[in-house]
Amino acid sequence: MKPLKLHLQNFGPFLDETIDFSRIQSNQLFLISGKTGSGKTMIFDGIVYALYGRASTEKREVKHLRSHFAAATKPLTVTFEFEISGRLYKVVREASFLKPGNKNETKPKLEVYRHKAGRFELIESTIQAGERFILELLKLKQDQFRQLFVLPQGEFKEFLVSNSSDKQTILRTLFNTQLYDMLKNRLTDKTKSMKNEIDQIYTKIQSAWDELYTLDHPDLVVEKGLKSEQYDLMMAALPQFETIAEQQVSKVQEEKSKVEKELNSVNEAVERQILRQQLSEQQIQLKMKLEQFEVRQLHIQQLEQQLKLMNESKMALKMYQNLQELEVALKRQQNEYEQLQNENENLEIEQIEQQQALETHLLQEDEMNQKAQYLERTRHFYQECKQLKEKYTRMTNIEQTIQKLMQDNEEAMQTLEAIDKDDLERQPDYEQKSQLQTEQAVLVEKVATLRIAQNHATLQARQQQQLQQYTEDLKRIDAEIAQKQANIQVISENEQQLLNHEQAVMTLRATLSQNVPCPVCGQTVHHVEADADIEQIKKIQQENRIIEQTLEKLKEQKIKCDANIAHTKAQLAEIGEVDFNEENLKKAETEQHDIKQKLEAIDKENSRIATIQEEVGRIHQVIDENQQQIQLLKNEQEYIQERMDRFVAETAYDDIETFQSAFTQLKSAVDQFYQEKATLTERRDQLTTKIKEQQYEIQLCVHQIIERSKQVQTLNADIDEALEALNIQNRETLLDILQDSVYKEAYEQEVKTYHQEKQIVELKMQDVSQQLSAITVEDLDDLKVKQQQQRADFEDVQRRFNEYAFQATQNQKTAQKINDEVTYLKNTLNEQIELFQLAEILSGKNAHNLTLENYVLMHYLEQILLKANQRLLSMTGQRYELVRNEKKGRGFSGLEIEVFDYYSNQSRHITSLSGGETFQASLALALGLSEVVQSEQGGIALDAMFIDEGFGTLDQETLETALDTLIQLQSSGRLVGIISHVSELKNRIPIILEVVSKNYQSTTHLRSNE
């Protein structure tokens, strides 16, 4: 990934700043310089924020990135353009913020563009989809990108000196090794759950074994002492439990049958004596009830006599009741007759008054009939009053419209007379135009053919000139390559090894003397070789390197030149022979111009004639349409006048408004007359009908009074005869019987109940006496003592039987349960033993005390150290090398880094390095980590790297060495940027991106140091 352009709006100290990285060559080292706090690191915050929505360091929160001096209505916006695998992309990210007057923040935005066909096209417009696309494109998460793209202040020094646990967190993020830990945890959880399951099985077996009953047998008590781990012995003992249980149950069952038989015999004897006592008490109670029935017998006889009298006088009582009802009805009928007579007299008086009022009202009937006829005759005019008013208004409008149309026709005729008669008779000349167009088409094709030939001739000349130039360049490049190859000097293998270990050799030689022990190996030095001319070898090596670089560029130029020659020849072959005459082209263009002018003149004249003909046709059409409209309006005018004449003749009114008002008043008077007439007639007819109904009701009432009087006389005679037959002195006595008959049903029920209850008691008395005579008398207390003893014996035997039977049944179920659990336990142990062993190895219970993830992380760390040491040895003069501490431990041990010192030939703690040496080691480690992660992430290519500070801790010589390392890094085509305010760097680094701070705002300026 190579940055091209970064645009920051309201981002930290940058209110509106654009940084164009494309102006820096791919293999150039450049410096980002500025005062402390000017915003150097904010540039990388902008890049990381655009891609991931986060700052470049964990300590800086996103909400603090917005400038405090930004306009209140303007958002924080970052636009970042970059290149990946030869394709250009642009990311625009806008942060949320609170606008003045709003309660809620604006929504953040993210847009991703891809360069295609010369412009950027939008491919993602939502945050979720955009971030997913960026992640798939870069193949790096935000933490990984921060570690590889930007080397922040102090973070790699912390990584260098951190312990295994801290490194584990960082390496986990970069290499996604959590899956190995997840695998170990899942396997551990699975084996843990399986161990728990096996422990649960053991617990179930022990619990089931403890549930077995011994049935009070000493042999089973001994077997109960077995533990679940002795499940084979348990399985062998289970048949013994079943056999002994069957024997114990059978023995107790025989004893139970014997005791139960004796208890039943005693229970029967006790029950008989209790029954005898109960029967004796019942016999006494029955005798007392019979005595009570004797006392009630006189009262029952009186009730029976009264009931007999009621039954015999039933007919007389019915007639007496009917007589009372008839006398009441007769009295009511007489009152009703008097009321009807009064109402009939009042109705006759009201009828006379209504007849007189109707006769008076009918005196106006002839006049009202005439008015009604007038209303009926003129009703349609009244209903059309609105239309008549509109037609009257229409009459005036029609007259004005006719005058306007006649005036328009006169003006149209004047316009026709003004047109030239010759123009009226002429027609457009389309035939001549067609001939000229045919000639023009031929000339256009001719000119196009000549121009193509002209272009081919020009291109052919230019291509031949380029081919000559490319051929001369190729000859020159071949000559230069031959000369450079001849200038390369050969360096022997011994001289090359001497150069590779120059610093170590010089240091060791300075300490060596003849016949004195070596400070490294302890052996006596017998001979010291003279120093080789290292400087001369280094000079030759440098000259060869410069020549090789030049040769590479010349070879690239030669390949490009060969390709250009081949391409130019192919284009010349494609063009072929060209035949072109300039005079023919000019002549054809002149003829084409002349025909074009003639066509324009003909088109202009044809257009003028067509316009005149069109205008004449339009005028004739207008005149015809106006004449038709005038005739229609006159017809409508005659029809309206006829309607108005009929209105005046039939209504006798000239004014429509006056007629409408008079019609309304007249109709109201006529309607009122006929309404009153109908009301009076209806009331009269109603009174006549009601009088007839009243007279009928009076006659009916008189008839009913006569009939009921006859019935009263007949009933009085019948009642007297009945009293005489019953030997009842007067009607008062009969009335008493009638009043007492209300209780007849109660009397009958009381008599019936008395006889039924007495009969039941007599029958019970007879049954009890028979039962007492059949029972032999015994001592009940002695029997109860014997019964209690027998029951206690039976309950004891029954309890033992139930216990043994239950225990035997439960033992069978428990034995089956134990058998199932033991079988399952054996199968589980056989299947899972290998899984248990694998889980222990992955969790660190192995010869190296390493978990699976720790083993993988150690592998990655070894790869990182291998890459880092390639640069660290060069920067430290082949003295220092980073090595992993291989001390065994538990968990995440083995990730500590130590430094191996070739001078002392032993390793020591990393913190023993000086500040400058620590920076060198941190830089080498960062570069090594970047290369390994890029390789592991599917070959992703980060074509840029930025280093934030750290150079201030280096002395002049070490600074030179670090810069040489970075220069080697940039020679591989990677863009390397350094953030620093060290003044020496400004003189050494050719390109400087200067961050200038002024008050609250910062700006950038890219300049060359050459």
Image (spheres, grey):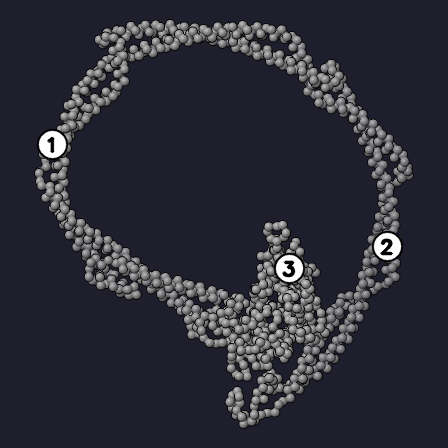
Disc 3 residue type?
Ser
Residue 429 in sight in this render: no
Quick check: 392 above or below 370? below
Residue 902 in sight in this render: yes
Along the horizontal axis of the image, is 901 left or right of 335?
right
Q: Which mark is residue 769?
A: 1
Residue displayed at 33% across by 7% down: 712
Mark 1 falls on what kind of element? helix
Residue displayed at 60% across by 75% down: 953
Quick check: 401 above or below 42? above
Q: Position of residue 859 (x, y in %)?
A: 51, 73
Query: To which quarter of the image does residue 160 belong?
Result: bottom right
Disc 2 residue type?
Gln
Which corner quadrant holds the C terminus? bottom right
Mark 3 falls on what kind of element? loop
- Mark 3 or mark 1: whose residue is earlier in sequence: 3
According to the picture, the residue beneath numbered tag 2 turns out to be 592
Label 2, label 1: how far apart the Cα atoms are = 158 Å
Residue displayed at 40% across by 69% down: 837
- Mark 2 or mark 3: whose residue is earlier in sequence: 3
Q: Position of residue 177 (x, y in %)?
A: 50, 67
Q: Position of residue 952 (x, y in %)?
A: 62, 74
Q: Which of the two marks, 3 or 1, is nearer to us in this view?
A: 3
According to the picture, the residue beneath numbered tag 3 turns out to be 67
